[in-house]
Amino acid sequence: MVRRGRLAALAITSALVPFLGAGAQASGGGGGGAGAEGLHLVPMEEITVPVVEFDRVTGALRFKLVLEAANAEAAAKVTTELPALRAATVAAALEFARLNVSGLRAVDVAQMDHDLTAAIHASAPGVSRVLIVEVGANRG
């Protein structure tokens, strides 16, 4: 019974995500208004890492990031370096999940943001901000 409720919640969330993302893109740029030329966003594909508690996998942490580059040249460089940035992000996320994620509490997104930003800045100084646009954890 609980599984059916989770699936229904996941289906509703999945159905709403495209609408939420479309609204964010429409308001974020492309219109040529004041400041539009200063926004350089590079999206990353969703990342999923296991949550390990007491030497066994107890769930998964999944998230999506968007990297904000300082300028167009930095955005182009970040785009070509995405595989290396993904590897650095996965390593940082594995450590974060090991230390901070549990089935008994909510994900500390502020700490996650801090850890992932530090890892990405070490690999790509041209990234001015790391934006966590989606995060979730489930027990498995």
Image: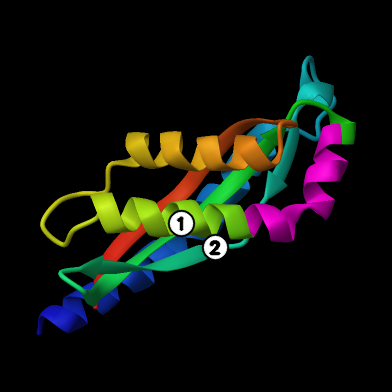
Where is residue 137 drawn, in percent x and y?
30, 62
Residue drawn 87% across the image and 32% down it = 72
First reached walking from the N terminus: tag 1 or tag 2: 2
Instruction: Give the label on residue 16, or none.
Output: none
Residue 26 location in percent, x, y? 68, 39
Q: CA distance from mark 1 to mark 2?
A: 6 Å
Query: For this rendering, which residue is in front, 66 or 60?
Result: 60
Camera sees residue 44: no
SS assignment at label 1: strand
Seen in the picture, residue 39 relative to 95 is either above or below; the reply is: above
Q: Quadrant of residue 37?
A: top right
Q: Does residue 35 show up?
A: yes
Secondary structure under the numbered disc 2 in the rendered image? loop
Along the viewing direction, whichever of 80 and 71 lies nearer the viewer: 80
- Other-residue count near label 2 (Cα within 10 Å), few / some / many at <14 / 14–19 / ≥20: few
Q: Which residues are magenta?
A: 74-86
Say if 93 sits above or below 130 in the image. Answer: below
Residue 46's label in the rendered image is 2
Residue 128 locus on image (x, y percent) = 66, 27
Q: Main secondary structure of the magenta part?
A: helix
Residue 76 belongs to the span the image colors magenta: yes
